[in-house]
Image: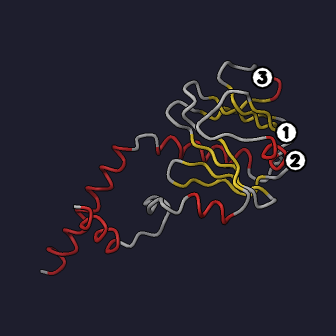
Amino acid sequence: SYFACDTFSKISVILYWFELFLEIMPELPEVETTIRYLKSKVKGKKIISIKKSQKKLRKNLNFKDLEQISQKNIMSVKRFAKYIIMGLENDNYVIIHLGMSGRLKFYLNENYEKEKHDHVILQFDKFKIVYNDPRRFGMFFRLKDSKEVKFFFKNYGTDLLINKVNFNEIYNKIIRKR
């Protein structure tokens, strides 16, 4: 029948590529877990201050970025691919990529002790979020508006975990890649 041959084979191909996608990106579930925790802690909260180390990451904040992030409320926390996107009240966005060894750590203010590989510290009223990355393959940077965000991600494909999936479109893209 039509269903058994055509649709089932398309779904099989898509599932095969999706499983391969997850094998290639094993850290994606870690980023998703980080997003959920981060959202529960920082959404709607004001960043009192931000500090960064002098050590370089793959993509860094500059002095002007610090001014644009400090004293702003976090309006949204989302994920696209393995990037963490925090939308600020001034339509600026903080983009974080954990790289191979990066982590976001949560500390109550009184419990924080600086560690060697702490690169960015977001200070909130009662706690800190610290970006720690021993290998410095990660990124922590600002984009000034939604147009820059769209431009930054324009060459990225469909995120199968958050976008509405059009199976025929995905199937056709996979078949063209062969």
Up-down: is 177 above or below 48? below
The residue where tag 3 is placed is: 111
| Residues packed near mark 2 inside 10 Å, few (<14), some (14 to 19) or many (20 plus) | some
Residue contact between numbered discs 1 and 3, judged by CB atoms under 8 Å: no
Give the amino acid type for the residue marked by disc 3 in the picture: Asn
The residue where tag 2 is placed is: 71
Q: Does residue 8 appear left or right of residue 29 in this picture?
A: left
Q: Does residue 40 appear left or right of residue 124 in this picture?
A: left
Give the Cα separation between the discs numbered 1 and 2: 6 Å
The residue where tag 1 is placed is: 49
Q: Does residue 23 appear left or right of residue 62 in this picture?
A: left
Task: Tell me the residue at 76%/61% (across/down).
Answer: 91
Residue contact between numbered discs 1 and 2, judged by CB atoms under 8 Å: yes
Task: Tell me the residue at 62%/55% (across/down).
Answer: 78
Give the amino acid type for the residue marked by disc 1 in the picture: Ser
Classify the position of the C terminus by image quarter. bottom left
| Residue 116 placement (x, y as % from top left) | 67, 18
Helix, strand or loop for disc 2 = loop
* First in sequence: mark 3 vs mark 2: 2
